[in-house]
């Protein structure tokens, strides 16, 4: 189905791998011009060389923890494409571990990239998105709904982003901007593969067994694919879904069972 996205311009953060890269790939396939933002310059340029066969893409390597990074990224997108229609806030991994072993710096770092990076990117892009009557999709995570003792940083950051997404949808409606959030569950990324490898080592089993045990514990049929999150993100950016505003959509294979 044509999503009506061709010719638009987007920024995707955390676009060097995993969900962010899948979203950049999906948007490029839909004819969107994409600025891929992440810290990993080498990976970004390799992806841009490939995606530029489909549409105009550019790489912007920067650490979104830096206070002026968001403004620089938005300026780069507008300079390259002449406009900005979409912002996908995806950057930000947070440290897991036993709460007593986590430091103030661990918590501050978790908020610095995922929360404050999202806030700054949204603020920096607002005027351009207002002009284009564009859309924002925040990639957040089900950890904000389901508390876990080894995810005290990530869960707290995600919960804050739930509130932020809902809150800014109000002025966004006034300014003609659509804002929604996606909460991925367990998605087949390098991060998940690392967690399963560690679980296999800790339990003294092979990775296939660790995978099966994780699925049984979670009571889900399978893990998700980055491309599935990308498909949902493209729909939320599409004018075909223009009445969806301030929504937080779980995409987790049925893992989240709370109302």
Image: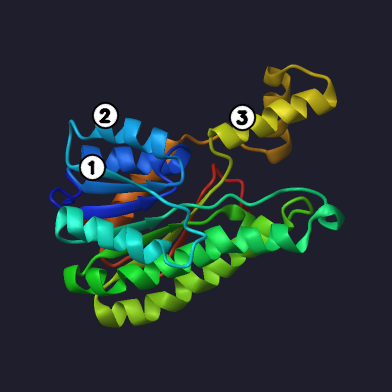
Residue 165 visible somewhere in the drawing = yes
Q: Which mark is residue 45?
A: none
Judged by depth in the image, the label closer to the viewer, 1 or 3, is 1
Q: CA distance from mark 1 to mark 3?
A: 28 Å
Q: Which mark is residue 50?
A: 2
Tell which circle, 2 or 3, labels the residue nearer the N-terminal end: 2
Q: Tell me where residue 156 appears, x and y as whole percent.
A: 66, 64
- Rendered residue at 26%/79% (across/down): 175
Judging from the image, what secondary structure is the residue with disc 2 in?
A: helix
In the image, 196 versus 37, the foreground residue is 37
Q: Is residue 172 above or below residue 11?
A: below
- Rendered residue at 59%/36% (across/down): 191
Disc 3 crowd rating (10 Å Cα; few below 14, some 14-19, many 20+) is some
Tell which circle, 1 or 3, labels the residue nearer the N-terminal end: 1
In the image, 31 versus 60, the foreground residue is 60
Tell which circle, 2 or 1, labels the residue nearer the N-terminal end: 2
Q: Which mark is residue 57?
A: 1
Q: Which mark is residue 193?
A: 3
Q: Does 140 sit left or right of 20 as displayed?
A: right
In the image, 69 versus 21, the foreground residue is 69
Judged by depth in the image, the label closer to the viewer, 2 or 3, is 2
């Amino acid at each position: 189905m044509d999503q009506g996205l061709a010719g638009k311009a987007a920024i995707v953060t955390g676009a060097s791998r995993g969900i962010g890269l899948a979203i950049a790939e999906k948007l490029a396939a839909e004819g969107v011009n994409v600025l891929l933002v992440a810290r990993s310059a080498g990976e970004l340029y390799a992806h841009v060389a490939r995606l530029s066969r489909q549409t105009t893409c550019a790489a912007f390597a920067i650490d979104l923890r830096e206070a002026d990074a968001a403004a620089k990224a938005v300026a780069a997108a507008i300079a390259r494409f002449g406009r900005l229609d979409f912002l996908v806030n995806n950057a930000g991994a947070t440290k897991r571990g036993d709460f007593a072993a986590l430091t103030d710096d661990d918590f501050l770092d978790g908020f610095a990239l995922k929360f404050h990076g999202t806030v700054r990117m949204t603020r920096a892009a607002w005027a351009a998105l207002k002009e284009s009557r564009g859309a924002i999709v925040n990639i957040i995570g089900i950890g904000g709904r389901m508390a876990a003792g080894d995810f005290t940083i990530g869960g707290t950051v995600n919960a804050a982003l739930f509130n932020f997404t809902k809150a800014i949808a109000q002025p966004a409606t006034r300014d003609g901007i659509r804002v929604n959030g996606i909460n991925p569950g367990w998605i087949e990324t390098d991060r998940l593969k690392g967690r399963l490898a560690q679980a296999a080592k800790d339990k003294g089993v092979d990775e296939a067994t660790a995978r099966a045990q994780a699925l049984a514990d979670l009571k889900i049929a399978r893990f998700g694919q980055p491309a599935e999150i990308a498909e949902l993100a493209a729909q939320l950016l599409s004018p075909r879904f223009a009445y969806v505003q301030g929504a937080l959509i779980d995409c987790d294979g049925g893992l989240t069972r709370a109302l």
